[in-house]
Image (cartoon, rainbow, N blue to C red):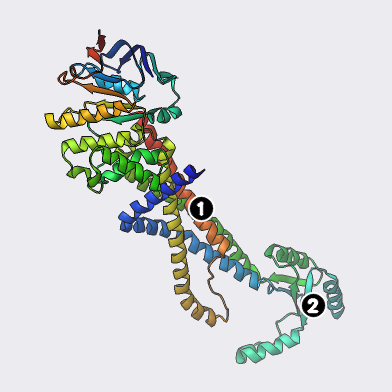
């Protein structure tokens, strides 16, 4: 056990001393990998925030029921009863054609004065209980069938677009993360390959005097994992600085829209997962390359 | 200890480097392998240290058949040997101390314990004062001695040296040879390959003389 710990601490110490000797290139590699890792991170932050934004406005979708112009008061009260009995509806509000006419005249003034008679229908404004766009749409098409309803219009279409956008963003994150994951493996692999080339002699001598493949592999695997760790931390820092940089301007824009939209750093588990996957990818890249090199050593 | 039984080695696309070689080496023996260059001395040593495998025949080291060893077992077999290579194979990117430390690190010995053994080995070859020097600053004889220190630091029971005095002048050569005698005195099996018969006849040791890959009686 003690020997086992010894071998590992020795490998780690060796890796750190090598990195200290090449501190600049080590930092550069970590930064390159960090940038690669931070791109899907930024996209994630934006999409997560949009998702939340979509969640905030979800309670607002409204269905406007425009009634037929020739509807009778009896028909209106029937509709009122239907609306009251509909379990999916949170609230509904009746706006008569006259009050709507008055409102229009007030706001549009002379333009409305040119009209000879009130063109507006009676209307109901319905707030559904359901939150997601699909349910709202279902309710809307159901209402369209009701007697006396000329047009049921859901103003949730932009939310649908937002949802579609968020869905697209999630897919983009996945694709980007996968691609950059490969890039991470490739970058570490190549870095380790170059290190193996410069340490060819040492590996050769070590093998001749009885080093196991495991012994030779160990420092390189640690190096790969440490590059990954460095990249993860660099990505975290980059992400944090990008977010704080953007938040300053976003706050201004959001204020104009009277929204408190802002970008937040992902929570600690996500950051942890990001760093852990970077470590894992670094390890994998190194493992692949070292094994290939060891095979080449053995087979000329 | 070491037993060769009808060992032949043929490199691909080349003549037979060794043909039907049989001999036995006892523990604590001093053995010279001689012969002109290209006679198969280096091949013989490589077969002993499981760096090469015989084409036919068996190589027994201790009680293990080196020719049938699994790849994973080879490193552990090699640790029984202290190897001194013809071209030293020192690592020029680190100092003497670190060069000698390598076999110990491979064996998982580190820290103060390793330090003690490394200095003991350097002391034995007279390089204790040079532990911080880089190998490139050492003379040919000193480099050879450093290689010996590295070979003996993990206290192997068998010491194998390929042309250890090859490029050295008489004074250094005698120095190196007396080092090997000293190791044999304390029970280490010492096997030395050398192309010049000079200085060997005087020694009390077994001589394996190779000629065109065959052992001359």
> Foreground mark, 2 or 1?
1
Instruction: Please tell me how many numbered marks the rendered image carries.
Output: 2
SS at mark 2?
Answer: loop
Q: Is residue A109 visible?
A: yes
Circle 2 crowding by C-alpha within 10 Å: few under 14, some 14–19, many from 20: few
Q: Nearer the viewer, residue B135 or A163?
A: B135
Q: Nearer the viewer, residue B122 or A241?
A: B122
Asked if residue B200 is positioned above or below residue B5 in the image, the reply reads: below
The circle on residue A277 is 1
> Disc 2 and disc 1: Cα gap in Å?
66 Å
Circle 1 crowding by C-alpha within 10 Å: few under 14, some 14–19, many from 20: some
Snapshot quadrant of residue A86: bottom right
Q: Is residue A186 visible?
A: no
Q: Which residue is mark 2?
A: A70
Q: Nearer the viewer, residue A14 or A111?
A: A14
Q: Residue at x 46, y 45 (%)?
A: A284
Q: Position of residue A8 (x, y in %)?
A: 45, 46
């Amino acid at each position: 056990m003690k020997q086992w710990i010894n071998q590992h601490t020795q490998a780690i110490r060796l890796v750190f001393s090598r990195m200290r000797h090449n501190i600049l290139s080590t930092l550069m590699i970590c930064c390159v990998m960090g940038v690669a890792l931070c791109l899907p991170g930024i996209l994630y932050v934006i999409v997560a925030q949009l998702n939340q934004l979509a969640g905030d406005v979800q309670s607002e979708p409204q269905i406007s029921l425009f009634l037929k112009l020739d509807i009778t008061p009896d028909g209106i009260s029937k509709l009122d009863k239907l609306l009251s009995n509909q379990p999916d509806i949170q609230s509904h509000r009746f706006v008569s054609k006259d009050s709507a006419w008055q409102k229009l005249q007030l706001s549009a003034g002379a333009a409305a004065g040119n009209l000879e008679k009130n063109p507006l229908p009676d209307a109901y404004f319905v707030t559904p209980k359901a939150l997601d766009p699909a349910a709202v749409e279902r309710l809307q098409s159901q209402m369209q069938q009701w007697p006396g309803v000329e047009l049921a219009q859901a103003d949730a279409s932009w939310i649908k677009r937002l949802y579609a956008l968020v869905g697209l963003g999630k897919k983009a994150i996945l694709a980007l993360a996968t691609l950059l994951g490969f890039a991470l493996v490739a970058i570490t692999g190549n870095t380790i390959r170059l290190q193996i080339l410069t340490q060819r002699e040492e590996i050769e001598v070590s093998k001749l005097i009885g080093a196991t493949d495991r012994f030779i592999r160990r420092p390189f695997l640690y190096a790969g994992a440490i590059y990954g760790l460095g990249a993860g931390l660099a990505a975290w820092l980059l992400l944090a600085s990008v977010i704080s940089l953007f938040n300053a301007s976003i706050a201004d824009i959001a204020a104009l829209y009277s929204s408190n939209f802002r970008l937040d750093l992902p929570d600690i588990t996500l950051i942890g997962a990001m760093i852990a996957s970077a470590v894992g990818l670094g390890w994998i890249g190194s493992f692949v390359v070292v094994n290939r090199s060891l095979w080449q050593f053995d087979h000329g | 200890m070491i037993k060769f039984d009808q060992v032949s080695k043929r490199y691909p696309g080349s003549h037979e480097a060794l043909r039907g070689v049989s001999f036995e080496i006892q523990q604590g023996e001093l053995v010279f392998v001689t012969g002109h260059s290209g006679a198969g001395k280096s091949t013989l040593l490589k077969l002993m240290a499981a760096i090469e495998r015989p084409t036919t025949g068996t190589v027994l080291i201790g009680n293990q058949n080196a020719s049938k060893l699994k790849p994973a077992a080879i490193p552990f077999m090699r640790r029984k040997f202290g190897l001194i290579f013809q071209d030293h194979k020192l690592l020029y990117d680190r100092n003497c101390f670190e060069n000698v430390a390598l076999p110990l690190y491979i064996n998982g010995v580190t820290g103060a314990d390793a330090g003690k053994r490394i200095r003991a080995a350097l002391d034995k070859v007279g390089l204790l004062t040079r532990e911080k020097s880089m190998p490139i600053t050492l003379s040919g004889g000193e480099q050879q001695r450093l290689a010996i220190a590295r070979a003996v630091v993990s206290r192997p029971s068998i010491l194998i040296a390929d042309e250890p005095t090859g490029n050295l002048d008489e004074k250094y050569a005698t120095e190196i040879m007396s080092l090997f005698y000293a190791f044999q005195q304390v029970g280490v099996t010492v096997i030395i390959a050398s192309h010049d018969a000079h200085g060997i006849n005087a020694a009390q040791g077994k001589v394996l003389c190779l000629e065109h890959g065959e052992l001359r009686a």
